[in-house]
Amino acid sequence: MAVDTMNDEAVQALAYGEQFAHAYGQHAMIGGEYILLGVLTHIELRDVNLKLRCPYGFVTSQMVMSRIVLFSRHSDSSDEVDHSECYERILESARRLSESAGSGFVGIEHLLHAILIDREDRVDSLAPGILEYLELDFEHAVGLTLIRVFGDSSCDIFTQMRNGELN
């Protein structure tokens, strides 16, 4: 996905994720967990009202980073960055959500929503696994992102999603 189809928040969130990946030695393959980490970092730094609830309060970038360090394989230093299939799938899902909402740009709410819905039928998605480990309230989180994306009409959309009427 081209950067020119994203708003500044989304571009900054992806940049944070890639910076973390390099800082922690994950150079060869960057997955969706780094999108999640970048989005959470952006939310915390900018105090965006898009915080994810869990039994410990809110999911933080520090919580996610600790799980990434535990589960990720690190590689030797390299200037080349490749994005995993999961990373690309999340970006594409965010783009489709943005289009369906009539938005001209992908924002952090689209990225976060794409991560949340990527957990179904996916074995290669570390990001949703981390959120499950942290006992994220997925229903609340999906509702929160939908409200941010669609505004007042999100209640009907959320009901359709829960009933399996929307992908």
Image: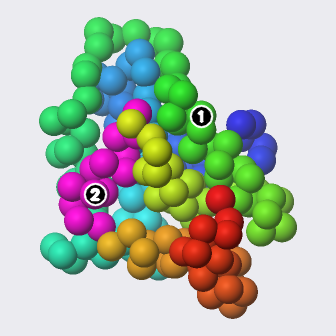
**Depth check, front residue: 153 or 29:** 153
- Residue 153 position, x and y percent, is 72, 86
Residue 9, above or below 153: above
Q: Quadrant of residue 99?
A: bottom right
Is the residue marked by circle 1 packed among few (<14), some (14-19), or many (20+) residues within 10 Å?
A: some
Evaluate whether residue 109 shows in this view.
yes
- Residue 86 position, x and y percent, is 51, 34
Q: Circle 1 — which element? A: helix
Q: How many marks?
A: 2
Q: Circle 2 — which element? A: helix
Residue under the image location 60 percent in, 68 percent down: 164
- Residue tagged by mark 1? 88
Can you say which quadrant of the picture contains the C terminus? bottom right
Residues shaded magenta: 124-136
Are the residues at dot 2 and dot 1 in contact (C-beta closer than 8 Å)?
A: no
Asked whether, in this view, residue 66 is left or right of residue 119, the answer is left
Q: Amino acid at mark 1?
A: Glu
- Residue tagged by mark 2? 132
Asked whether, in this view, residue 126 is left or right of residue 4, the answer is left
